[in-house]
Image: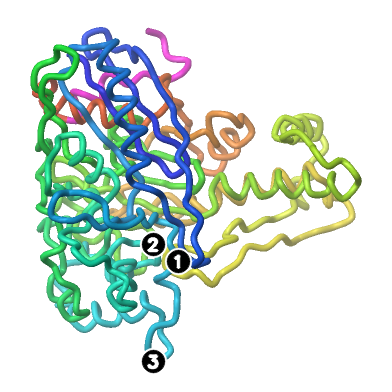
Amino acid sequence: MKALAFDIGTTKICSLVFDAENGRTLEVLHGANTFVPSVRPWERIQDPEAVFRIVEGMYLTMMKKHAPIGGIGISCQMHGILYVDSEGRALSPFYTWQDGSGALPFRDGKTYTEYLSGLAAKTFRGNSPAVPYTPAAGYGLVTHFYHRSAGTVPAGTSKLCTIGDYIAMRLCGAARPVMHATNACALGFFDPRSSCFDIETLEAAGIDTALLPRAAGDFAPAGEIRGTCGNGSVPVAAAVGDNQAGFLGSVRGADKGALVNMGTGGQISLIGGTDGNSGGEKYPDEQSPLERRPYFEGKFLCSGASLCGGKAYAMLEEFFRAVLRMAGVPNAVPLYGAMEDALRKDEDTQSPEEPLLVNTMFEGSRRDPLPRGWIKNISSANFTPAALIRGFLEGMAEELYGMLPEGRRGEASAASPMEKITFLAGSGNGIRRNAFLRRVIEKKFALPLMIPLHEEEAAFGAALYALICAGRFRGTAEAARLIRYQGETP
């Protein structure tokens, strides 16, 4: 059986066809995703119809070449929302996870996010640590609360949904979106244990909960597509979050591996267990920088995100190019190769006693947008381009490592899921393309870093998810056995 999968990312859209019978990815297509200019500086918006046209074109191309297809899977960037009418057509742009409206001032000296957090604290009964009572700017229901308060929810709105829900709905020709728990939780105010939104807090905020889509259970279809290119009916799985899809598509032996992703942002994710198991109720607590997110089959992910992951390294590369422009080189080529050459030449001269230290929290954190990064411990010996590059790489790794429970960081803890982790799986171009970052991560975590042979891990995970939905595999463990890592003997 073959699966067709799409991953709708922030900067690109990917499609692939995977053949479960021989374990091979048959073809991969890419398309650029673009932002729409906005007069509001806090907005980061995209055109959902433009996204659909790209996906539709990829779908037709892949079906003509690879039919029959047994199932279609979709993963998507998380947290963002758009509004649709009763016919399932977009009424608004897609407000991405980078939308900053939640950090704007709202009332009584509080931002929209802070105001919602206060309401959540008042309604919280203390019986559900899974509910994210620390929402962040960019979370879909925080963004919606801003638009509701500002009077900018489009007239005729019937539902709000994620971009993945929208694409699944349009492919199926449906009028109502369906939302899997992985995307529902990413909107905020959702308890993955009960698979329910925190209706009490949302209604206290004046949010019309009828706008929320119908929830889909694990491995449930959003609908089907009929009769394309001679193919019969093809089930379309409900869209899942790219974090969960990437984990499914990268980590073989999920209970023993953690996923480190370095794309535009950075992310560390590991299985937290099944609700009711040891540690499942206690970790992560409200003070942890890791979020508890629904996974599949009753399990959840402990997931932490840095807002400047690979973007921090891109900022440094742009800084070096700006220096060249200052020196009269207006059209400098990308300098990533030169940066790696500098590290390679400097490997034997770096003084471990006096490293240049970099904190890469240049855009704050999900919970607090105010902190900023820094560079310190500068001396006449270490103020060099190579030391700065190394400091950025180590800062990127340290930001994710610092989110982990104390069990891995020096104090044994029975509630810490990191105690059972024996390896890291690495994904994202930041890790795949930078051998120095891979070595920094391995050293920081004191664990081997395994790189999947297949690229586009989230799309690959969406393909595995679609095959489970179609009945080809009995669950995630069986499907993930198809994952192979670089350097493994076949």
Q: Is residue 477 magenta?
A: yes
Residue in front for this viewpoint, 389 or 403: 389
Q: Secondary structure at mark 2?
A: loop
> Tag 1: residue type?
Gly
Distance from label 1 to label 3 (Cα)?
19 Å
For the residues marked 3 and 2, what is the alpha-carbon distance in whole angstroms?
21 Å
Tags 2 and 1 in contact by the CB under 8 Å rule? yes
Identify which residue is drawn at 21% across, 12% down: 67
Circle 2 residue = 138
Q: Is residue 394 left or right of residue 304?
A: right
Image position, residue 134 (x, y; %): 33, 70
Please state, as top left, top right, bottom left or bottom right, where the C terminus lies in the image.
top left
Question: Looking at the rendered structure, which numbered label has been put on residue 213?
Answer: none
Tell me: residue 413, above or below residue 200. above
Residue 42: x %, y % from top left: 49, 66
Q: Residue at left 44%, top 57%?
A: 98
| Magenta range | 476-490
Relative to the observer, which residue lies in front, 122 or 60? 60
In the rendered view, would you say 323 is above or below 138? above
Secondary structure category for the residue under label 1: loop
Tell me the chief SS of the magenta region: loop
Near-viewer residue (171 or 222): 171
Residue flagged by tag 3: what amino acid is it?
A: Asp
Q: Residues within 10 Å of mark 1 (few under 14, many from 20)?
A: many
Q: Callout 2 environment at 10 Å: few (<14), some (14 to 19), or many (20+)? A: many
Q: In the image shown, does 353 or 372 lie closer to the viewer?
A: 372
List the residue tagged with mark 3. 108
Location of mark 1 (residue): 100
Q: Is residue 5 left or right of residue 178?
A: right
Q: Give the amino acid type for the residue marked by disc 2 in the picture.
A: Gly
